[in-house]
Structure formats: C-alpha cells, structure tokens
Amino acid sequence: MLFNLKSIYVLILMPFLLSSSAVQSICLKQAKDTNLLFANCLRCHSDKIICKQRLSKKRWNSTLVWMEKKHGLKFTSISDRQKILTYLSTHYGINKKKHPMAQRPTNPLP
C-alpha cells in the first residue's frame, strides 16, 4: 500500500496536534463533544470564528444548515450534528457572558 507524503505527515503529526497542550491552547470550551468540532468545523476554519459568536440555538442551527447547503459540510450522523448544535448553543449562546477581552473599555485612555 502506497502512502503519499502528505498523508504520512498527517499520521505523524496528528498525535502532537491533538495533544492536551495543543487542545488547551485554543479558545474553545473543553467539553465532552469538543472533539466533534475538531472533526467537522475546524477542518475549514479557525476556532476563533466560533469563539467570538454569540448566537441562539435557532441561529446556530441555521448556520449549520447554511454550511451544509452552501459549503458541503457533511456530518457523520444526525446525532453528531445534534451534539455540535447543543455544544455551540450551550457554550456560545446569546445568554453566555462575552469573552473577557470584550468587557474592556472601548477607549481606556482619557
């Protein structure tokens, strides 16, 4: 079986990329379904785009539908999609406090 160079790099580097120090350095809240975001959402874009959002469950759902229709996002199962939706609305819903940097004064200098 032949492997190309890119797949070998992925196989070698994946344990390091998913190590606890790498996972803790991102802004996502650690929960039991965080790994689903790595498998689905973070393949295409940064975690920061998720962390700065504060959307209702309905808006997160419409965002996932949009990603499925317009950008070809495919979930492995309906339950994975539901878990991601629950994770996003729980940790990045409109009722959650904003990131601490968002609470700083807009102009700290007089």
Image: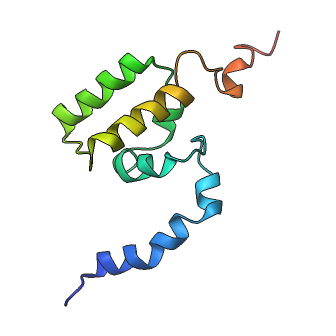
The relative height of residue 98 versus residue 37 in the rendered view (above or below) is: above
4 sits to left or right of 94 = left
Q: Is residue 6 above or below residue 58?
A: below
Q: Quadrant of residue 28?
A: top right
- Count every numbered label the image shows and give the total: 0
* Image quarter hosting the C terminus: top right
Q: Whole-percent x and y of residue 95? A: 58, 15
Q: Determine whether 99 is above or below 103 in the image.
A: below
Q: Please provide percent x and percent y for residue 19.
A: 58, 66
Question: x, y (%) of residue 88?
Answer: 47, 31
Residue drawn 24% across the image and 27% down it: 66
Residue extending farthest right: 110
Which residue appears farthest toward the bottom when viewing the image? 1
Is 37 situated above or below 97? Answer: below
- Tell me what residue is drawn at x 59 percent, y 60 percent: 22
Residue farthest to the front?
Answer: 79
Q: Nearer the viewer, residue 86 or 53?
A: 86
Quadrant housing the N terminus: bottom left
In this image, 91 relative to 59: left or right?
Answer: right
Q: Residue at x 54, y 47 (%)?
A: 32
* Residue 46 image offset from top left, x and y in percent: 45, 44
The image quadrant of residue 4 is: bottom left
The colour scheme is rainbow
The residue sitting at the top extreme is 110
Q: Quadrant of residue 27?
A: top right
Answer left or right for 68 relative to 48.
Answer: left
